[in-house]
């Protein structure tokens, strides 16, 4: 099964250590620790993330044996029509079975 998770809120430094950032970090770490058969697509912010988040993502991709891919998208207002259309295109083109956007 192919599962996509929008982790763009994690790329903002001020979100990383509170609320949504903590949730995303713990979700990703926990899922990858217990699941060894599904494929994951993490949708990250293009070029806007802080170095710590980027290093963490790169580490996940390296240690996952090809089960994790990172797709970078521009950071847009999450409620905008342009953002919704962009996410729809990515989910459709990647043939995602489950999409989670916290």
Image (cartoon, helix red, strand yellow):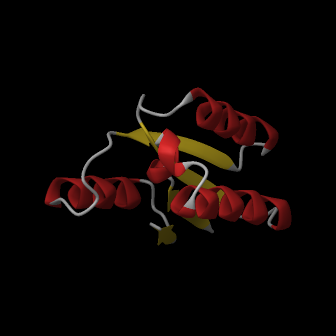
Q: Specify whether residue 4 is in view.
A: no
Position of 63 relative to 51 (above/below)? below
Which percent across, then down, holds residue 83?
A: 24, 54
Which percent across, then down, holds residue 10?
A: 52, 49
- Residue 73: image quadrant is top left
Which percent across, then down, holds residue 27?
A: 67, 65
Which percent across, then down, holds residue 37?
A: 78, 64
Residue at 56 percent across and 55 percent down: it is 21
Residue 89 falls left or right of residue 63: left
The quarter of the picture where the N terminus appears is bottom right
Residue at 61 percent across and 37 percent down: it is 53
Residue 42 falls left or right of residue 92: right
Residue 36 falls left or right of residue 20: right
Residue at 57 percent across and 48 percent down: it is 16
Q: How many numbered marks have been drawn onto this rendered protein structure?
A: 0
Return the residue found at the far bottom: 98
Residue at 75 percent across and 35 percent down: it is 62
Position of 55 relative to 84 (above/below)? above
Judging depth in this view, the residue of 13 and 51 nearest the camera is: 13
Residue 49 falls left or right of residue 60: left
Q: Specify whether residue 54 is in view.
A: yes
Return the residue found at the far left: 81
């Amino acid at each position: 099964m192919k599962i996509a998770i929008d982790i763009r809120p994690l790329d903002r430094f001020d979100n990383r250590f509170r609320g949504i950032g903590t949730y995303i970090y713990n979700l990703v770490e926990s899922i990858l620790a217990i699941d060894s058969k599904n494929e994951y697509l993490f949708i990250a912010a293009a070029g806007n993330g802080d170095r710590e988040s980027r290093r963490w993502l790169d580490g996940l991709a390296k240690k996952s044996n090809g089960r994790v891919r990172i797709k970078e998208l521009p950071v847009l207002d999450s409620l905008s029509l342009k953002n919704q259309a962009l996410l729809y295109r990515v989910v459709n083109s990647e043939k995602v079975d489950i999409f989670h956007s916290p």
